[in-house]
Amino acid sequence: MSVSLRKQIEFKPARHETSFGPFKLLHVLPWLILAAAMRVIAFGGGPVALPAIIIADISVLLAFFATAQQSIEAAGGQSSLGELTWGEQFRLSFSILWRIALVMVAAAISAAAAGYEAAHHLMAGLDGMAFDQFTHPGRFWSAAIAALVLLMIVRAERDDGQIALFAAIGEFARRGLWLGAAVIALGVVNIALAYGQEAVRTAIWNFWQTSQASDFIKNLIYFCFIFSFAMLRLWITVTILTLGLKQSYISDGRG
């Protein structure tokens, strides 16, 4: 698979006019809405569950691409992700998706063989980049998957759209000091976000039980709750990982 990605990512630490945010993330909302709708369909089971999961994961990846472009450019890097056509973005998403799916399947099988009862939740690694995971280990796993996706995007920028899973894994290992720290930090933040989201969810539930507000207002509040946390989680994920990647470039003398 090849798409027209022409600019190599270069981080420039001397550039001081950019910052990490806040970013305008409303443009990723349609993808997150589609992902959320597909998640509901998938949870219902049946023959449509697998196609719904695939569409949901691709939607999360497309939202990740848009956020990554802003994060890279805000960090002083260059990215041509915004130059891709819709078709190229879908092809890039699917190319990354099936490779990451293999990683998640291998991890889930290995964890199950080791006796981890919640091993099947590791299949939600991509989903957890925007939506809350089911377990604390799963939240760290989603952070690691997001780091791997970011590296695959970075390498695709350099290699004219060629996706290389094992090369990205190798680069993850080489940049393990900074990226590993970023993944750990992101996992901790994901746990904190999970507790915060649960607290807000409980407050909204109590509001629903006691308020005389119309169903429209109640549904609007719940809509804002779901997608505010999804956009916040996505922004935090990409920001922390981009910062770790930038620091690894600087430490290599390549920034």
Image (cartoon, rainbow, N blue to C red):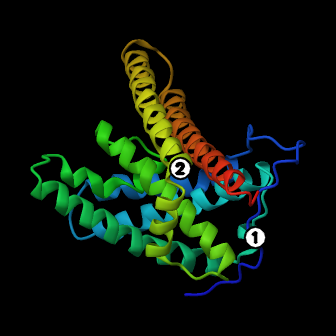
Is 186 or 210 nearer to us in this picture?
A: 186
The answer to which image quadrant residue 97 occupies is bottom left
Q: Quadrant of the C terminus?
A: bottom right
Mark 1 or mark 2: whose residue is earlier in sequence? 1
Residue type, numbered disc 1: Ser
Residue 85, by quadrant, is bottom right
**Residue 62 x/y as whole percent:** 58, 63
| Disc 1 to disc 2: CB gap under 8 Å | no
Give the residue pinned by disc 1: 80
Q: Can you say whether 66 is above or below 141 in the image?
A: below
Q: Nearer the viewer, residue 247 or 96?
A: 247
Residue closest to the eye, 191 or 54? 191
- Where residue 211 appears, x then y in whole percent? 45, 14
Numbered disc in front, either 1 or 2: 2
> What SS does tag 1 mark?
loop
Residue in the picture at 77% in, 63% down: 10
Q: CA distance from mark 1 to mark 2?
A: 22 Å
Which residue carries the number 2 mark?
179
From the viewer's perspective, tell me whether residue 56 is left or right of residue 29: left
- Amino acid type indicated by mark 2: Leu
